[in-house]
């Protein structure tokens, strides 16, 4: 089970990356918050790793930063190496249809 300290660590890292990207764009908190459609307080909470920020605010942030595709990997179905090998073998064993 993920304890509170580990959860906070991940949220702090995520918030730090958000702040870094905001600063790289040379956006103030007020301007970036307006682009996200959230208050400056919500943006501050996101950057500080507050756990109560709604996921929708994070989705908006990813969209504004043109990183929304990064969400595709979250909870994506994992295929094991063995399953990939079996699928590859199954494709190789297919026979061509008979010609008449």
Image (cartoon, grey):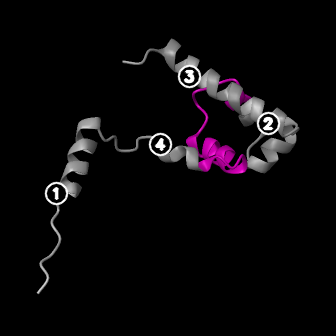
Circle 4 SS class? helix
Q: Along the line of sight, which residue is nearer the eye, 86 or 47? A: 86
Q: Is residue 71 left or right of residue 89?
A: right
Q: Earlier in the sequence, mark 4 or mark 1?
A: 4
Q: Earlier in the sequence, mark 4 or mark 3?
A: 3
Q: Is residue 76 left or right of residue 33?
A: left
Which mark is nearer the camera, 2 or 1?
1
For the residues labelled 4 and 1, say whether their Cβ atoms are less than 8 Å apart.
no
In the image, residue 20 sits, relative to residue 98, either above or below, namely above
In the image, residue 49 sits, relative to residue 58, either above or below, namely above
In the image, residue 91 sits, relative to residue 44, either above or below, namely below
Give the quadrant of the C terminus.
bottom left
Mark 3 surroundings: few (<14), some (14-19) or many (≥20) residues within 10 A: few
Give the residue number, with chain letter if any, for mark 2: 22
Give the residue number, with chain letter if any, for mark 4: 73
**Numbered mark located on residue 93 in the image:** 1
Q: Which residues are magenta?
A: 44-68
Q: Residue at x 51, y 20 (%)?
A: 7
Which mark is nearer the camera, 3 or 1?
1
Q: CA distance from mark 4 to mark 1?
A: 31 Å
Give the residue number, with chain letter if any, for mark 3: 10
Circle 3 SS class? helix
Q: CA distance from mark 3 to mark 1?
A: 45 Å
Q: CA distance from mark 2 to mark 1?
A: 51 Å
Mark 2 surroundings: few (<14), some (14-19) or many (≥20) residues within 10 A: some
Q: Is residue 17 left or right of residue 93?
A: right
Q: Residue at x 34, y 40 (%)?
A: 78
Where residue 94 appears, x then y in whole percent? Answer: 17, 62
């Amino acid at each position: 089970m993920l304890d509170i300290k580990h959860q906070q660590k991940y949220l702090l890292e995520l918030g730090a990356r958000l702040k870094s990207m905001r600063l790289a764009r040379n956006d103030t908190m007020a301007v970036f918050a307006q682009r996200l459609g959230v208050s400056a307080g919500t943006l501050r909470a996101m950057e500080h790793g507050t756990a109560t920020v709604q996921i929708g605010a994070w989705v908006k942030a990813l969209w504004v930063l043109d990183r929304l595709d990064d969400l595709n990997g979250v909870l994506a179905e994992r295929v094991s190496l063995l399953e990939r090998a079996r699928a590859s073998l199954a494709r190789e064993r297919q026979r061509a249809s008979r010609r008449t």
